[in-house]
Amino acid sequence: MPGETFKGTISRRSGNMNVKFRSETVEIDVSNAARRIKPGMFAEVSLVPEATEGALTVPATAVVASTERQYVIRVGDAGKAEFVDVRTGQKSSSLTEVFGDLRKGDKIVVNARNDLKQGVKVAAN
């Protein structure tokens, strides 16, 4: 059935995470009223995670983690670097959810480095 899409929901999780492969066995319930899906068939599955309410996403490279804290660097009104402490949420290969004193539309340093100092003038694009 190439090209067809069937939607389902995760109904059961094994609770046994394989750390090496970052995987877990799950069962997904899919409607099969027409009995077209047969035992032994294989499927390609795409999982779409639910976003966390109230979270903003930033490029993963914007989050700086040190031994003391996690933060992003916001470009303030005067064009100066402001460190904003954040907690991280869900992550994808390129984006990270962040929770902190950030607002939609804030300009942040995308390729943040821990050697950038608070209050230093930064160029905004």
Image: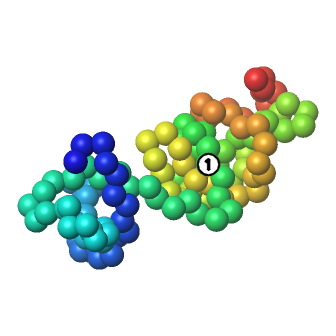
Q: Residue at x 20, y 61 (%)?
A: 36
Q: Nearer the viewer, residue 68 or 1?
A: 1
Residue 46 in the image: x percent, y percent?
35, 51
Q: Residue at x 50, y 57 (%)?
A: 90
Indicate the quadrant where residue 31 lies.
bottom left
On the question of residue 95 being in view, the answer is yes
Indicate the quadrant where residue 32 lies.
bottom left
Identify residue for label 1. 57
Q: Is residue 51 above or below residue 83?
A: below
Q: On the rendered structure, is 32 left or right of 113?
A: left
Residue found farthest to the left: 40
Q: On the rendered structure, is 53 left or right of 93?
A: right
Residue found farthest to the front: 34
Q: Residue at x 58, y 63 (%)?
A: 52
Q: Residue at x 25, y 58 (%)?
A: 23
Q: Is residue 44 above or below residue 52?
A: above
Helix, strand or loop at label 1? It is strand
Q: Is residue 117 above or below residue 36?
A: above
Q: Badge 1: how crowded within 10 Å, few (<14), some, or many (20+)?
A: some
Residue 118 in the image: x percent, y percent?
76, 39
